[in-house]
Image (spheres, helix red, strand yellow):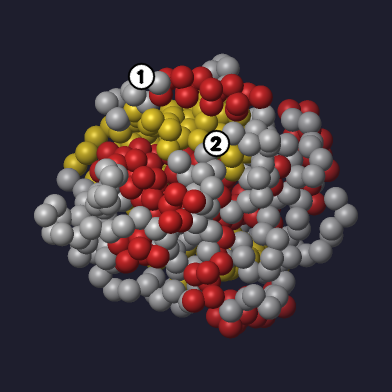
Amino acid sequence: QSDTKDYSLPNASWSPDMVGLYNELLEKTTAGSWRRLPSYLYSGQFLKKEDLAGIAKAAPAAEDTRLFLRVAEKEGHGFEYAIFHNPLEKKCICLFQPGPHLEGLPGIIHGGALGTMIDSTFFITAYRSADAIFTGTMTIVFKSPVILGSVVRLEARVTGTEGRKVFLSCEAQNSDRTVLFAEASG
Amino acid sequence: MLRSCAARLRTLRVLRRQPGDARLPGSQPGSGKLRSFSFEDVTEKDQALPKPSWSKDLRLLFDKFMKKCEDGSWKRLPSYKTSYTTSTIQDIRAFFSGSIPLKEELMSQARLFTRSFEDGLGFEYVMFYNDDEKRVVCICQGGLYLQGPPGFLHGGALATLIDITLGTNAMVAGGPVMTANLDISFKRPVPLCSVVVINSQLDKVEGRKFFVSCNVRSVDEQTLHTEGTGLFIKLEPGKSLI
């Protein structure tokens, strides 16, 4: 597991829309309340040591694994995304550009692929804001189809906590926020 | 949100065809709209068959369900890497009032999400359906590239498997559908590379709405990993879903 490249940085496959939104959010990080989160090939690279040790007790870590979101061999084919976190407001914004390997119906994203991005955004928000790791429940209402290659802006926030449980909500919209693709809670 | 019904569309056509007659489920009877099968339907490799990457558990389960198919009550569903052939694109587009702006470059690179991985690294799964009982069983093995927390299957990968199983269940009952709602309760995490069984059934049909539910259990049935329910909407030509 020697690949330490940060994949959540603009590359040639990112559309102008995606790069534009990314730069907008990058600007916000200079003010201090927002942070850009790096993203690697392996889950072990973003979990804290103590959490890794806890998880390892339940399941032996296998060799040659890959984080599900980072499996595309070629740039632009799978999940291209970057996540920005605001710890004070306990929320995350994820910019997501789905590639052709995430297809469901012709030209349209697979429901499971969007579900995966929603789940991952929930996880990052919950982990960074409240140390929660495993998804308990996830409810998604799909409203409008996402065309492959277009940009999806997901915004997730913590809505409450109860002991070890963290509750969140998420909206997936298009880049100018005029179209709602899906709503989720978890 | 749309689900990968196109792949299921192909498999439905393969299952329901009679010699010389390729009628799309849901097309108007007597409209004279006969479509011939593309060669790709029969020559492209069926992914829902045993491979070297399959674990012993998966292989045994597969054999068990193939036995159930012998009396005709259960049927194995074939599965392909691409969602569509050129003829089915038109069929799918007929369901949308506006056309979808597909970039040529993307179209040629497109692969069905659940079949876009190298053998064994991603989703290995086979679905069997029982028409009488309106049930679908999906036996699945999540590969090394589906990891979430170290050593466990990514929640999104499991959500994807649930989405396709529930969707297929709705589709064998009612033709092409798309996902409207998905509600999943994760109870115990699934260890990476283990085999799970997803049992789904059709609960209710209300017009174009198909209500389905499922549970996900370990091979030995001792562990209940997940429960899920879904609402799918039947696609109909001319009726917009947006």
Residue B95 location, x and y as percent? 27, 63
Q: Residue at x 53, y 22 (%)?
A: B63
The subunit letter for the residue under badge 1 reads: B
**Closer to the N terminus: mark 2 or mark 1?**
2
Can residue B172 be seen here? The reply is yes
Residue B135 location, x and y as percent? 35, 29
| Distance of label 2 from label 1 (alpha carbons) | 20 Å
Q: Residue at x 53, y 69 (%)?
A: B108
Disc 2 and disc 1 in contact, CB within 8 angstroms: no
In which quadrant will I find the N terminus of chain B?
Answer: bottom left
The secondary structure type at the circle numbered 2 is loop
Q: Residue at x 55, y 80 (%)?
A: A17
Q: Looking at the rendered structure, which numbered label has been put on residue B71?
A: 1
Residue B136 location, x and y as percent? 39, 32
The secondary structure type at the circle numbered 1 is loop
> Which quarter of the figure has residue B148?
top right
Relative height, residue A153 to residue B7 (above, below) = below
| Farthest-out residue, front | B20
State left or right for residue A106 relative to residue A161: left
Circles 2 and 1 on the same subunit: yes
Residue B220 location, x and y as percent? 58, 17
Along the line of sight, which residue is nearer the eye, A176 or B135? B135
List the residue tagged with mark 2.
B49
> Which quarter of the figure has residue A125?
bottom right
In which quadrant will I find the C terminus of chain B?
Answer: bottom left
